Image (cartoon, rainbow, N blue to C red):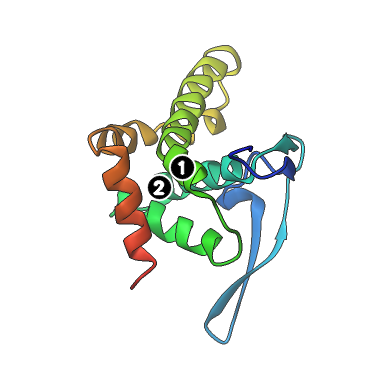
């Protein structure tokens, strides 16, 4: 028995710069998604981890809890099984590391300041790394209860 859902087409770069939103009568809703050049077949939990990482970087405070709010939004529309939830911490950390290192490397070659947009993530990754995985997932899931 497989521990993951079937492969889906995933965005692979789901972040605030690729989401079109609308605010009507005080309600925020997603109206569209841009930039599908990194799309591939993968597991939905990968897209969730990517989105959580970007939202944590964008948060001005409570970066760790921001991950829980992002997860809550996804779980209101998409289910994750226990294995996926148990891997989410590692997937978020992995995306931080990938984005931070590739950003620095590509900047060393191309000198485009856009490539450094995730660099504030080093401080967030350090905070994240200090929390045991099980504790973090419980904390994020408890946010959904409020």
The quarter of the displayed image where residue 97 is located: top left
Residue 135 or residue 29, whichever sits in front = 135
Compared with 27, 79 (above or below) is above
Q: Residue furthest front?
A: 1
Q: Which mark is residue 120?
A: none
Asked if the residue under mark 2 is in contact with the one under mark 1, i.e. CB atoms within 8 Å, the reply is yes
Report the quarter where the C terminus lies: bottom left
Residue 99, position as x, y percentages in the image: 51, 28
Q: Residue at x 37, y 58 (%)?
A: 141
Residue 98, position as x, y percentages in the image: 50, 25
Residue 17 or residue 145, whichever sits in front = 145
Residue 17 or residue 13, whichever sits in front = 13
The residue that label 2 is drawn on is 56
Secondary structure category for the residue under label 1:
helix
Secondary structure category for the residue under label 2:
helix
Report the quarter where the N terminus lies: top right
The residue that label 1 is drawn on is 53
> What's the CA distance linking mark 1 and mark 2?
5 Å
Residue 35, position as x, y percentages in the image: 73, 44
Compared with 27, 117 (above or below) is above
Q: Residue at x 22, y 34 (%)?
A: 130
Can residue 63 be seen at all in this image of the molecule?
A: no
Q: Is residue 116 left or right of residue 20?
A: left
Q: Residues within 10 Å of mark 1 (few under 14, many from 20)?
A: many
Q: Residue at x 72, y 42 (%)?
A: 6
Q: Is residue 66 left or right of residue 85?
A: left
Q: Residues within 10 Å of mark 2 (few under 14, many from 20)?
A: many
């Amino acid at each position: 028995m497989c521990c993951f859902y079937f492969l889906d087409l995933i965005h692979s770069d789901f972040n605030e710069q690729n989401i079109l939103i609308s605010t009507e009568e005080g309600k925020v809703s997603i109206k569209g998604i841009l930039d599908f050049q990194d799309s591939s077949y993968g597991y939905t939990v990968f897209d969730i981890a990517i989105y959580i990482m970007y939202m944590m970087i964008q948060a001005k405070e409570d970066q760790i809890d921001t991950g829980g709010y992002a997860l809550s939004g996804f779980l209101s529309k998409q289910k994750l099984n226990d294995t996926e939830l148990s891997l989410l911490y590692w997937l978020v950390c992995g995306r931080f590391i990938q984005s931070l290192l590739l950003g620095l490397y590509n900047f060393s070659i191309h000198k485009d300041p856009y490539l450094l947009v995730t660099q504030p993530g080093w401080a967030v990754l350090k905070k994240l790394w200090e929390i045991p995985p099980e504790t973090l997932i419980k904390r994020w899931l408890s946010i959904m209860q409020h």
